[in-house]
Image (cartoon, rainbow, N blue to C red):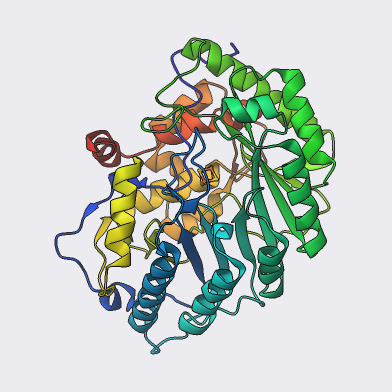
Amino acid sequence: MSAVTEAVRPYTSYVYAYPHKTAYRPLPDRPALAGLWADEPKDALSLYAHIPFCEVRCGFCNLFTRIGAPDELTTRYLDALDRQATAVREALGDAAPVRFATAAFGGGTPTFLTAAELERLCDIAERRMGADLRAVPLSVETSPSTATADRLAVLAERGATRLSIGVQSFVEAEARAAVRPQRRAEVEAALGRIRDTGVPVLNIDLIYGIDGQTEASWRRSLDAALVWRPEELYLYPLYVRPLTGLGRKGPAESDREWDERRLRLYRHGRDHLLARGYEQVSMRMFRRADAPALGPDDHACQTDGMIGLGCGARSYTSRLHYSFDYAVGMPEIRSIIDTYTGTRDFSRAEVGRRVDAGEARRRHLLQSLLQAAGMPLADYAARFGGSPFDDFGAELARFEERGWLDTGAPAGLLRLSPEGLAHSDGLGPELFSPAVRAAMAAYEAK
Ligand code: SF4
């Protein structure tokens, strides 16, 4: 097979949730949360709190986050989060047992909050929502400059089982090229502080495809990360997206050359980790073979509901995905956060997308197929009846033609080949429905 499969770009988009937020729209009926959740199973929910603040805006980042928090904005944000949590918990009711099976704080950078503010965030999760943080997996994202000993101590004491740090590159020149200037010594010191907490799972995020990055410099970053024996490593391809710092600049090489370089770096990184005792969980995620699995997989829960708190968080019932308004540009993000902090009534879903039976099948296929372990056909049949070959025959035939399906997989297992996994970010978007694709295309980036 050629390095880049003919006419198929390997890096279209990262499918971490389907449908993507750019397919969400204002919900004209603003449905009440109490009604949305009334008939949903609520005994194994996921809780996610979104903290949309960072010290800097990295050049590659299109997450919902702003730089800094002037005028006690974090206090007002946590006040709003508290009000939202109260409203959501009330909407979940007590007619059926409500239990959270996992929790995560993401962003942005949750550790942008002070130690005292992190205590408050944990209190909101526990006292308002009823999540037992010390009894369930709790994953928290951090960054080198905000991973201070006092903040990490709070998180460890409140039950964090996984700390995930975005390093991106241990090579200072590459960090600068990705518009994330940081000193190597600062990164190493932060990793030392994280290990000192004794939190069982350390995840390190790295990025490949940065301007000037070669196989040799990529390996230097990988080896520098491996010194810490992280239980998990996420290897992200670099994307240049509209309205981000890099989106305004663009790489010097052609798209095709860049695709080929990213594929080379991916394969190099994958093989390097596989040879050093790591298992591949998905295109991005690698887990040390002897590590405990205490964080969420690179795998949004297929069947269980999700409660998102904060203005960048999504919530999922089986029939509706909802959130607040979405933007990438800084002025719009600031204004959405201001609207959120001024909101008094959190009892309704404002922006979202309904997920019908066809979309639920797509979502299941997408999220299972993008896992290295593949998808047991029996799981699909049990949930939906029938086979994905009946529902998505044309797409799967195309993938097979391109060598993306593992023809040697055990009977009853639909699994990607190593090349299919390498092309996850091209393959995933091909499974989007025409309706979702049209909504995403009509979305105007702001
Ligand atoms: S990559 Fe992380 S630290 Fe950088 S701007 Fe995005 S959320 Fe903030």
Q: Residue 91 occupies which quadrant of the picture?
A: bottom left
Residue 367 in the image: state x and y as whole percent: 50, 47
Answer yes or no: is residue 356 visible: no
258 and 379: which is toward the camera: 258
257 and 251: which is toward the camera: 251
Q: Which residue shows up at 38% across the image and 89% down it?
A: 95
Figure quadrant of the N terminus:
top right
| Extreme residue toward the bottom, this view | 95
Q: Which residue shows up at 52% across the image and 10% down it?
A: 253
* 324, above or below 33, in the image: above
Figure quadrant of the C terminus:
top left
Residue 44 in the image: state x and y as whole percent: 52, 73
* 194, above or below 45, in the image: above
Q: How many marks?
A: 0
Q: Residue 274 occupies which quadrant of the picture?
A: top right
Residue 407 in the image: state x and y as whole percent: 62, 30
Answer yes or no: is residue 434 visible: yes
Does residue 425 appear left or right of residue 140 in this picture? left
| Extreme residue toward the front, this view | 71
* 142, above or below 348, in the image: above
Does residue 257 appear left or right of residue 235 in this picture? left
Q: Which residue shows up at 77% across the image and 19% down it?
A: 216
* 242, above or below 401, in the image: below
Does residue 73 appear left or right of residue 221 in this picture? left
Q: Which residue shows up at 54% across the image and 53% down it?
A: 109
Residue 195 in the image: state x and y as whole percent: 80, 57
192 and 23: which is toward the camera: 192
Q: Residue 186 occupies which quadrant of the picture?
A: top right
